[in-house]
Amino acid sequence: MSSSIANLDSADLQESRPAEVGRSNKGRRKILAISSRGGHWIQLLRLRPAFEGSDVVFVTTEPEYRSMVDGARFRVITEATRNEKLRMLTMLLQIFWIVLRERPTSVVTTGAAPGYFAVRLGKLLGAKTLWIDSIANAEELSLSGRLASKHADVTLTQWSHLAAPGIVGHCGAVI
Amino acid sequence: MIFVTVGNMDPFDRLIRAVDQWVSERSLTEDVFAQIGKGAYHPQNCKYIPFLTPAEFKNKFANARVVVSHAGMGTIITSLEMRKPIVVMPKRANLGEQRNEHQLATVRHFRRSKQVLVADSELELGSVLDQVLATDVDDSAEAGGEASWPADPALIQFVRAFVS
C-alpha cells in the first residue's frame, strides 16, 4: 500500500506537467490509467471523472487515441496478442519503463494484457493497483482478470452475479 | 446514413457481407457507410473504409440514424453515450471470429434493450434492420447528443477514493 500521499491542490499538480522524471514525483498522487485498445479503452475513459484533480497518464496500444484524452498525458505501447511472444515481451518492457519513469501511486486498468503487466509491475514498485474487469465479461471473469485478481489490491467485476466475496468486488458498472 | 462498423481492425466479414446483401435487396434512400477493418470482403453496394480515426469515427456515429456493429462493448457504450440506436450481431468463437463466446453473453444481457437491438446471426440481420428503420426514432436518439450517460456513481466514487 502506498503510504506517503500528500494532499496537493490543483496548482501543484499543474506544475508537475509536462513529463517529468519519475523519482521527483515522490509524494505526489499519480495515476497510471492503462488498457488495450477498443472496448477496454472506452471503458477506461468512462472512469475519467474519478481522475479529476489527479495527475494521470493514459497508456494504450493505439496512437490515434491521443485525440480522445483532450491533452492529458498519453503514452503508447506495442500491441500484442497472446501468441505473439516477442511483441508481448516488448510490451512488458515498455510498461516496465513507463512505470519506472512515472512512478504512479496507483494503477487503474480495465484490461487486458497491458493491464495485467501494469498491475504486476506497479505492485513491484509500490503502487496501489485496481483491476476493473471489462463489462464484456458477463458470464465469467476474463482470463487476464482471473490472473490479475491474484495480484491486484482490488479486483472489481461490473456484473453483480460475478462478485466473489473477498476476491472480486462489485461496485457498479461504467454504463 | 446507416453506419456499419466492425469496431476495430479485426475483420468481421460475415457482418459486412450480410449488410451488403441486405442493401442490394432493398431500395434504400439513404447512404450506407462501412468501416471494415482488415476484412477481406469488400462490399459492392456501399462505400467502405478499413479504418477511421477516433474523430472520424465519432463523426460517422453522430451523423448516423442507425449503427450496425459487432457486439463489442466499446461500440455499444458509444451508442449509449450518443443515444444512437444500434443493431449488434455477435462475433462467434466457433467461426474463428473471436477467442471466446463473450459476445453471445453480451447480447443475452441486452436482449430486452430498446436501443441495442440484437441480430443473432446474418440470417436475422436483414429483418432486424428493416424493423429498426421502420421504427420512428425518438427525440433523444435524434438529438444524438454528447455523452450524457454517466458511469455508475458508486463506481466513480470508489475509484476516486482508491486513487486518492
Image (spheres, rainbow, N blue to C red):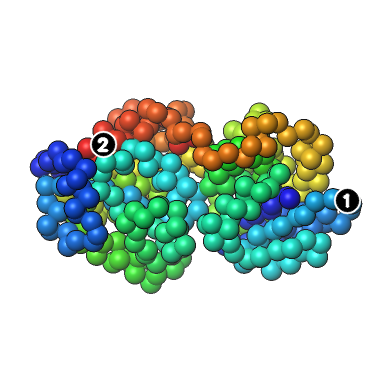
Residue at 68% of width from left, 31% of height from top? B139
Q: Is residue A65 something one can see in this rendering?
A: yes
| Residue A29 in picture, x, y percent from top left | 19, 45
**Quadrant occupied by the C terminus of chain B:** top left
Nearer to the camera, B80 or B124: B80
| Residue A133 in picture, x, y percent from top left | 41, 42
Residue at 73% of width from left, 46% of height from top? B121
SS of the residue at dot 1? loop
Name the kind of residue labelled 1 in the image: Arg
Task: Tell me: A34 left or right of A82.
Answer: left
Q: Are marks 2 and 1 on the same chain?
A: yes
Q: Which residue is mark 2?
A: B162
Residue at 26% of width from left, 33% of height from top? B161
Residue at 31% of width from left, 40% of height from top? A52
Q: Which residue is mark 1?
A: B26
Chain under disc 2: B
